[in-house]
Image (spheres, rainbow, N blue to C red):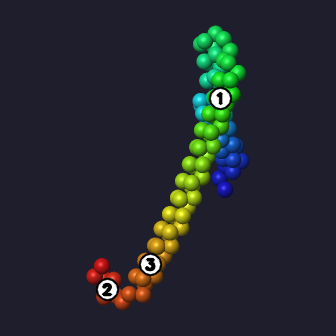
Amino acid sequence: MKGGFFVVLSFIAMNSINLGIINLLPIPMLDGGYLFQYIIETALRRSLNPEIQIYATAVRTVFLLYIQQQAFVKQILLSAFRQQYLFGCCVYSLELLMMDGKTVRNM
């Protein structure tokens, strides 16, 4: 294994940087979402109404749950497609093996 410790260290550093960048994006329920709210308060030069803050938190939560649900469904469908694709390739390979040489050459 070539440079094992430094490879692991660079992997950890990249993940930390990636997490920091994603955390600052204005995605709801992350620090970037609250940072966006603070920027709006600074631009208005007053604090937002507590009812608006509660509503914004509810919208952020629903949006985050929607994103998680979409990612989960996409991953399940992708996993099912991969299994079906791999199984189909295996069946096709077995069919080719069971054919006689003459049919395979004509394909």
Amino acid at dot 1: Tyr
What x and y, as percent, mark residue 33? 63, 29
Instruction: Give the numbered dot on residue 93.
Output: 3
At horizontal 68% and vertical 23% (from top left) the residue drawn is 51
Q: Does the rendering let one see residue 14? A: no
Query: Residue pushed farthest top?
Result: 45
Q: Secondary structure at mark 2?
A: helix
Instruction: Give the numbered dot on residue 103.
Output: 2
Horizontal relation, residue 22 to residue 100: left or right:
right
Tell me the crowding category of disc 3: few under 14, some 14 to 19, or many 20 or more residues within 10 angstroms, Cα based: few
Comparing labels 1 and 3, the label whose residue is closer to the camera: 1
Q: Secondary structure at mark 3?
A: helix
Disc 1 + disc 2, Cβ < 8 Å: no
Q: Secondary structure at mark 1?
A: helix
At horizontal 69% and vertical 47% (from top left) the residue drawn is 8
- Which residue is the site of mark 1? 55
Which quadrant of the structure image shows residue 17? top right
Amino acid at dot 2: Thr
Front one among 61 and 1: 61
- Label 1 and label 2: CA atoms lie apart by 68 Å
Amino acid at dot 3: Ser
Q: Earlier in the sequence, mark 1 or mark 2?
A: 1
